[in-house]
Image: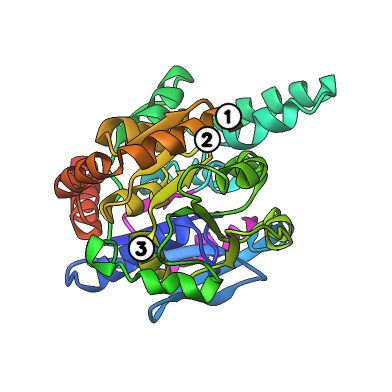
Amino acid sequence: MVFLDVNSFLSPKGGGARTYHLHKAEWFEKQAKHRYVILGPGTGPGEMELGEGHRFHTGWGIPYGKEKNYRFLLGLAEADRLIERERPQVLEIGDPWFSARWSRRRTDLVRTCLWHSDPHTAYLEPWAALGRPWRKWVSRLVLGKVDRWHKHFDLIWCASEWVANLLRKRGYPNVRRIQFGIDKNRFRPGAATPEVFTRFGLDPQRPVLLYAGRLDFEKGVQTLYRAVPMLTRLQGRPQVLVTGRGEWAERFSSMDLPGFAYGGFLGREDLAAVVASSTLMVSTCSVETFGLGVLESICSGLPVVSCQGGGAGEQVRESKAGTLYPDQDVVGLLGAVESALEHREALSNNAMAWRATWPTWDEMFAFQTKTCEELAHARW
């Protein structure tokens, strides 16, 4: 069978969507009876490097964000051309925007959707709350259209029960939770090399609190930014390492405090070493549909301090591998960090127990593909 994924959230420069598609491409490469095709946004029709020797097709997209790392995919005529050429049986839409709208007319395919990001809680709701009454009207209008664009899917995959419940309440059909995979060879306690912190000017003998992720407003990093000066003064003098890129990167990079370092964007190998070597992971996003960085930390034996909301908070509650604090609460964050430091050994043990139960990427894609095959066979 041929599987076609279309995703506006795909960026060759990083992010959870890239990680997902890269591992999916690696899995399909090992399957003799299946073929995998990816379409993402670019400057026009063509191809771009995904990583590890894999490439993806591109259609025209409008760049957005301060660093222009992401684009809205509008050139969906390229998707039609790929369908004519590759003859897929299964279509997966990875973003809730125009790709979802376009997919309504592809009744010749099994149509699935993977809910990478929730537009209501991550974008529309915060934008509408900025004060002008007309924003709420526009937000409701757009959300209504997004909801209508998703009523035709044969299956909507969600990586957390939190987002699955959101969609069910909005009347979405065929919603099913799927456990995102993890690269257990890369993210493991044995990858720890504390000396890695010397490259950032940090002391490997002192605790290190790590933030690794996109540095944008919807990720809640403003809470971490306010908390950093107080975190470095907690008992034991923990250090703070912030990695990633985004609209807040400049603020973090210009922060000049003893015990703080901004590490920029890290590749997969460097990230795995830093995660395994850290003392705690800090997660600040209350609207994560899943929180892949949280899972990678837990599977490295690293306790996580997370805000209560979203898929990240759900993972911490289910795994019992961390502590929680109220969303956007700096004082609560400080208390959660203190508690996690005090009970770190027990939390790390819980993380390792959780790791043993979690599927790898190969196991996830085997289940996902088998489910899609069953849908296709039921139709044809």
Q: Residues within 10 Å of mark 2 (few under 14, many from 20)?
A: some
The answer to whether 172 appears left or right of 276 in the picture is right
Question: Does the magenta segment cover residue 75?
Answer: yes
CB under 8 Å between discs 2 and 3: no
Between 21 and 210, the residue placed more toward the observer is 210
Q: Which residue is mark 3?
A: 277
Q: Residues within 10 Å of mark 1 (few under 14, many from 20)?
A: few
Q: Which residue is mark 2?
A: 334
Any part of residue 170 in sight = yes
Q: CA distance from mark 2 to mark 1?
A: 5 Å
Q: Residues within 10 Å of mark 3 (few under 14, many from 20)?
A: many
Label 2 or label 3, whichever comes before in sequence order:
3
Q: Position of residue 9 (x, y in %)?
A: 54, 54
Residue drawn where x is 71% and y is 58% of the image: 255
Circle 3: residue type: Ser
Residue drawn where x is 32% and y is 64% of the image: 23
Q: CA distance from mark 2 to mark 3?
A: 21 Å
Q: Quadrant of residue 217?
A: top right
Q: Which residue is mark 1?
A: 331
Q: Position of residue 85 (x, y in %)?
A: 42, 70
